Image (spheres, rainbow, N blue to C red):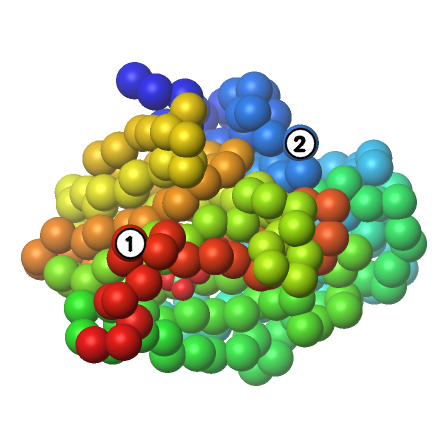
Amino acid sequence: MGQLLKKPKTKVLKQGVTLVHDTEAEKAPLKYVSFKLVDIQANAIYEETLGSYECCIVVVRGTVTVTDGEHVFSNIGTRSSVFERKPTDSVYLSNGRSFTVTGTSEACIALCYAPSNKQLPTKLIKASDVGIENRGQLQNKRLVHNILPDSDKTANSLLVVEVFTESGNWSSYPPHKHDEDNLPYESFLEETYYHEIDPPQGFVFQRVYTESRNIDETMAVENGDVVIVPAGYHPVGVPDGYASYYLNVMAGPVRIWKFRNEKDHEWILSR
Ligand SMILES: O=C(O)C[C@@H](O)[C@H](O)C(=O)CO
């Protein structure tokens, strides 16, 4: 297996709290992004103190109460499956904050991190604040939930987005990259993909490849896998009969998402 596909590796942290993914523990080759996925049973409590990282807690499914000791966001989360295709609630927390997440039902949370040295207010990003966007045409149609886009100044460097791609369609396509710190033409942003598939026995394909091909991995991604994108193009193709969900976390030196499409495939956009 290559370096970029991470299978779930469950670790019980305490009764009712299971760590499913941890890109740092997996030694992902990333400097700006880290990602955890945690399952929480009802009434169980996950707790953490952030060091030099800011964090966006996305309630992937189920409901939870989040507090940083100052603010309490009770019973947040909107869906029992991502495939309800409705936006969810999230909480932004600055570096240095301590927080707890208590399951108010059985729940799954994503913890999306990026380095930060700036104190910003804790904020509830309500499902109703999430921008909904339909992108693309033909078999390139996909639905996007913008949780923390670059136009929203809640975070210092984190960008967070959910993407739904229906059966037979392609997303993160035509292939684009954001691996050169060369604004205004392109920004450098690392990225992680947390994938779910409906029905769960399915798979999707994701290729991650750089211009030079020093990275070139084509992966069969299964339900619950994480894909690391340290650099390069990163398209996703969804087989007939299956629907794809992924949660993207991006961060880099400048909080701007400025990508470049691969020239050979840009014609896809003008059909
Ligand atoms: O538009 C899409 O298909 C989603 C992608 O833009 C995805 O969020 C990404 O690759 C960000 O760079």
In x, y percent, where is residue 78? 48, 70
Q: Is residue 256 above or below residue 7?
A: below
Mark linked to residue 31:
2
Q: Visible in this render: residue 41?
A: no
In x, y percent, where is residue 45? 65, 42
Residue visible at 66% across and 46% down in the picture: 181
How many angstroms separate mark 1 from mark 2 (CA)? 30 Å
Mark linked to residue 264:
1
Q: Residue 115 lies in what quarter of the image?
A: top right
Label 1's element?
Answer: helix
Label 2's element?
Answer: loop
Q: Residue 185 lies in what quarter of the image?
A: bottom right
Q: Amino acid at mark 1?
A: Asp
In x, y percent, where is residue 233? 40, 45
Viewer-side residue, 79 vs 217 = 217
Residue visible at 76% across and 69% down in the picture: 153
Residue visible at 22% across and 51% down in the picture: 237
Mark linked to residue 226:
none
